[in-house]
Image (tube, helix red, strand yellow):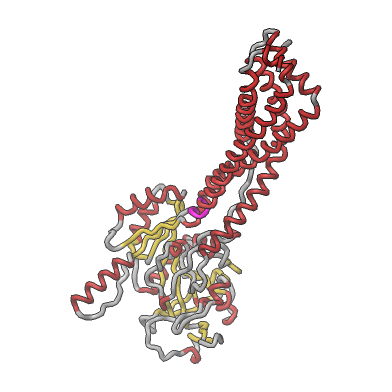
Amino acid sequence: MNFLKRAWQNITFKKGRSLLLIIVMTVIMVFIMAGLLIRNGAVATVENTKNEAGASVTLAADRQKAFSKMRKQASSSGERPSLNMESVSLKTVKKIAKLSQVKSYNVSVSTSVDADSFDSISTSSGSSVMMGGGGPQGESDDDSTTGDITVNGVNDMSTITEFKNNKSTIKSGRALNSDDVGTKNVVIENELAKENDLEVGDTITVKDTTSDTNSYELTIVGIYKASSTSTSQMMGPGQSDPSNTIYTAYDLANTFKGQSGKVDSATYSLNSPTQKSAFIKTAKKDINTNKFSLVADDSTYQQLKKSMKQMESFANKIVWLVAIAGTIILALIIILMVRERRYEMGVLLSLGESRIKIVGQLLVEMLMLLIVSLTLAGATGKFAGQALSKQMMSQITSTTTSSTDQPGRMGGAPTTGPSSNSGEKPSGQPNGQPGQTANNGTNKQNQPEMKLQISAVTLLQLGAFGFTIIAFAVLLASMNILRLEPRKILIG
């Protein structure tokens, strides 16, 4: 009799045993499917969100080398010189921006001005808000050349980290972009606008800090709301309230600062985090590395990659542990099943049936049951995978958040976003305000959601695992019985 026909008859006649084997194999296949989905999903998540996570490289004066130079001057002259932070040539910035790895770029020029036609906001040590600046009540006895309004000159506000992450948002009007270069457009903070009854379309007048005669009339094109963290943080003595930060085009900020053709720093957003090393290597050829440094920030991508690697590792362990355990369990079940069929096999061997066909019959029986198990696992494995992945992602997120949180960080006015992620404070920032804290992507809302998709490749991988498990199980179960002679089997 054909061994394929015998296999089918054995399955249909022994319905209870067949159902038991289907249940056992389905459970094994479901866990393997879940592991495969999580592993493939982790790899796909890193690949798909790689460009969104992005990486930025900041070109600015090298603070360490500037401090080293200052100390050398102090030791040679016996006097304490001031720290000199070199400005970056705008020509060099634009040249580097043409490199193939660059998706977009932004520049930063930080300076300060004095409010003239409006009042700035000053915060006392008792946290009470007072108005200062333009009116008589704003007159200060401080002879410092630091103005009461912080100016951040930029090329494109949409690339600033605070705005990209929606920590600061445009409340009315619009943000500045490259078209505003050469204009006197300005974006001011919401609280500053409220206190002075200012709206989009109004004009304000400011004076530079070097001369009382140079005044500039600026047109408000947008009003932004600063992040709640920056506005609620304590301000030290002499520090300007974050609401006093305004954004202008970088060339206008250069005018306030008394320079042209230069910027304090430039931040390049790369097409892919994997291009970071190649970009830095090429860009270094265009800068003086004794004065300037290129500081990369791909912390969000690296954190994502680390989380997904943990997920992938755990998923691999699930797959292999379940595969090994499944092989052992199925082998034991088949061994018991074969022992019950010793007489059947002895008769078949005595009639001249080859051992290979008998093993083939067992294998075909299991493969028929496997097809049913694979169908059930394909329908239910995704739900098991989603439940496991959510639990794992929650644990990984909690772990990374608790290990990277740094309470007590102080923040100042928003800076040009990605540049602050590198840990470097842009040069020329007035009032000693620290740069924006890094956005390391460890917050739960920044964690990407892993999407598990059942594809043909996943089903093929599951089928391959299932076939391998069954093949090993049948081989282990058949070893003891098939090495015996037909006469001994029948007598036994």
Res 66 quadrant in image: bottom left
Residue 414 visible in rendering: yes
Q: Position of residue 76 (x, y in %)?
A: 18, 75
Q: Nearer the viewer, residue 149 or 463?
A: 463
Whether residue 113 is in magenta: the answer is no
Which quarter of the rendering shows the N terminus? top right
Residue located at (60% from left, 59% from top): 445
Main secondary structure along the magenta-highlighted residues: helix
Establish if 359 lies above or below 155: above
Residue 3 visible in rendering: no
Res 20 quadrant in image: top right
Q: Nearer the viewer, residue 225 or 343?
A: 343
Establish if 179 lies above or below 41: below
Is 165 left or right of 368, judged from the image as shown? left
Q: How many numbered marks, from 0 up?
A: 0
Whether residue 303 is in magenta: the answer is yes
Q: Position of residue 114 (x, y in %)?
A: 44, 81
Q: Position of residue 422 (x, y in %)?
A: 42, 62
Which quarter of the rendering shows the C terminus? top right
Establish if 310 lies above or below 326: below
Res 252 quadrant in image: bottom left
Magenta part of the chain: 301-305
Residue located at (63% from left, 22% from top): 480
Establish if 439 lies above or below 361: below
Residue located at (62% from left, 30% from top): 469
Q: Nearer the viewer, residue 409 or 139?
A: 409
The residue at the far left in this view is 76
The residue at the far front in this view is 491
Is 31 left or right of 188, judged from the image as shown? right
Q: Nearer the viewer, residue 271 or 178?
A: 271
